[in-house]
Image: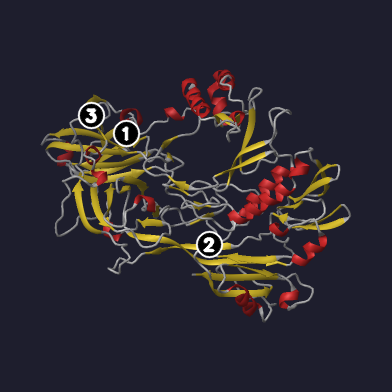
Amino acid sequence: MKRFTAKIVDMIKQENLYASQGGPVILSQIENEYGNGDIESRYGPRAKPYVNWAAKMATSLDTGVPWVMCQQPDAPDPIINTCNGFYCDQFKQNSDKTPKMWTENWTGWFLSFGGAVPYRPVEDIAFAVARFFQRGGTFQNYYMYHGGTNFGRTSGGPFISTSYDYDAPLDEYGLIRQPKWGHLKDLHKAIKLCEAAMVATDPTITSPGSNIEVSVYKTGSVCAAFLANVGTQSDAAVTFNGNSYHLPPWSVSILPDCKNVAFSTAKINSMSTISKFVTQSTEADGSGASLSGWTWVNEPVGISSDNAFTKTGLMEQINTTADKSDYLWYSLSVNVKNDEPFLQDGSQTVLHVESLGHVLHAFINGKLSGSGKGNSGNSKVTIDVPVTLVPGENKIDLLSVTVGLQNYGAFFDLKGAGITGPVQLKGFKNGSTIDLSSKQWTYQVGLKGEELGLSDGSSSLWKSQSALPTNQPLIWYKASFDAPAGDTPLSLDFTGMGKGEAWVNGQSIGRFWPTNTASNGGCTDSCNYRGSYNSNKCLKNCGKPSQLLYHVPRSWLQSSGNVIVLFEEMGGNPTKLSFATRETSSICSRVSEAHPLPIDKWTSDDDARKKVGPTLSLECPRPDQVISSVKFASFGTPHGACGSFSHGRCTSSNALSHVKKACIGSKRCSVGVSIDVFGDPCIGVTKSLAVEASCS
């Protein structure tokens, strides 16, 4: 560990990247969340000396910048302990001399194969960030700010999906996710407006009412304030500096001048977008979206490599494969004599196998007889497979499969995978059980197709016949395709496939597993952001495949002659594969008369502020687009959300015509949200403007 850390530090120094050398690197980190209670405590008396050693080792490397340990309450000086989590406003540093730092603000959560898709409302993230800085926070970092893809076999796990979108402000495909990106951008600008006061002094924190907290940063003539309502049910009114402020539940209002609200975490000025994946036509229409020329190679069942070896007993998978492959074959022959009682009495024999995980396929005499899988909560697999044995030699081939390796928790390196037993034949009429666990097993690391390099598509073994074999286990498939037209992000829809891995032009786009579906329960159409968030609070996609779409970077493609290779482990039909492109179908916004004015228009000049007022803004996501239609516009009391707006009891008659005039034909447009623009359809009621438009 010391050699590795010193090597990385030296590489950074060689490039003059540390801030102490004039570079951009301002922090270094050693260890990560070792101090979590369920980790450090399990290492007993050896844990604290290790923490001290790691800290001393790191600081001895003389980087000239501070070192941090995330989630390490006992971090020794001068190491800075930092917070990771959904909320860090209550975090206490390990020393009064160190800044309050938040190294991982979780913008969403990871997706597991077999799970629903988690998301986190931006109002809650903004609330968490504002609360952190309200209570003296110094530094905050998002995890993830840019989602991504676990290409190849890189996903941690087990059972972490290939997609690592994480509901991040910049999504897996590199596109802006609105309103999350825009609302957080406005939040950052509002906090920046408070910077002079915040860096000069600590906050004075008071609680003038139930669930109300007021923080004031004031020095000389500079003043900034944060007003929070941490209640989850009711609006609150608070008087501050002689003025009255309305605070929605679970919100923070930011006052850069201790007088005017520049930003409310609960009131979004940023527009929203609705994006969808559009399946590309597979007809010969010139779009180049079709897969053609399918060929295949059968993956042999059981042992086929010269590198196979025999050992007595069952071997743990990770140590055996050294993570060179997801796959490990366990193979055994069982000799059955003609006079064996279970051949005569008609009873059903059962093959019982227990595995540490993660997926298991049992083949009897070359035929798939049964499969089992674990899940993200329990990766262990137990299968009981009815088998029919024949006189003479019977071949038992067990294919054990990993789906990402354990990468977190105490002793995660000892977690293990693969078949540890027992492996038994049981269920005979006479009640006897034959234990095969300690027999001589033959092992093969990886697949024959992996050894032959089939993934790049260049092998001479690919064959084609009139009928493509489908819905059969252990088959490699290959096809060619031209790059779909356009430059919008591209994915492959794996409808029809079972489980395996896919390569495009020799590059792995990851593990696919569309047959692993989420349970039906736990999802809601909308998620109430008010109240503490957890990874199971806001879920979508229940009852559907956890991941159906797989990112294909356009930078990996040529205009024509691209090659896709699939290894199908369980059985599927590759001719059902299709390409889909990511398109924005609608842009929306909803802004009320009570919203703060746009942060870019914020000024300490009250008169100028009143002239601007709340404003609804729309902008097409692509530089070559203009607003081509306005699907909905209502000023009054509209209902619903983006994509499902409807008129309320109170609505202005000229809203649609006014918005069309202001927006159609422009890349971006802004409309003032006031009765001066639309008239007053319902006096005494706070009105909103809701708009849905499309770009082309």
Cβ–Cβ under 8 Å for marks 3 and 1 = no
Q: Nearer the viewer, mark 2 or mark 3?
A: 2
Task: Give percent across and percent down for residue 415.
Answer: 42, 30
Camera-side residue of 261 and 124 = 261
Q: Nearer the viewer, mark 2 or mark 1?
A: 2
Mark 3 or 1, nearer chain start:
1
- Three-letter amino acid code at disc 3? Trp
Residue at the spot of label 3? 441
x 30%, y 69%: residue: 285
Q: Is residue 368 above or below residue 522?
A: above
Q: Residue 315 vs residue 141: left or right?
A: left
Identify the disc placed on residue 621.
Answer: 2
Mark 2 or 1, nearer chain start:
1
Q: Nearer the viewer, mark 3 or mark 1?
A: 1
Q: Residue furthest right?
A: 242
Mark pair 3, 1: CA separation? 20 Å
x 58%, y 54%: residue: 181
- Three-letter amino acid code at disc 2? Pro
Mark pair 2, 1: CA separation? 42 Å
Mark pair 2, 3: CA separation? 59 Å
Q: Secondary structure at mark 2?
A: loop
Residue at the spot of label 1? 324
Q: Secondary structure at mark 3?
A: strand
Residue 106 visible within the image: yes
Q: Residue 529 vs residue 441: left or right?
A: right
x 37%, y 33%: residue: 417
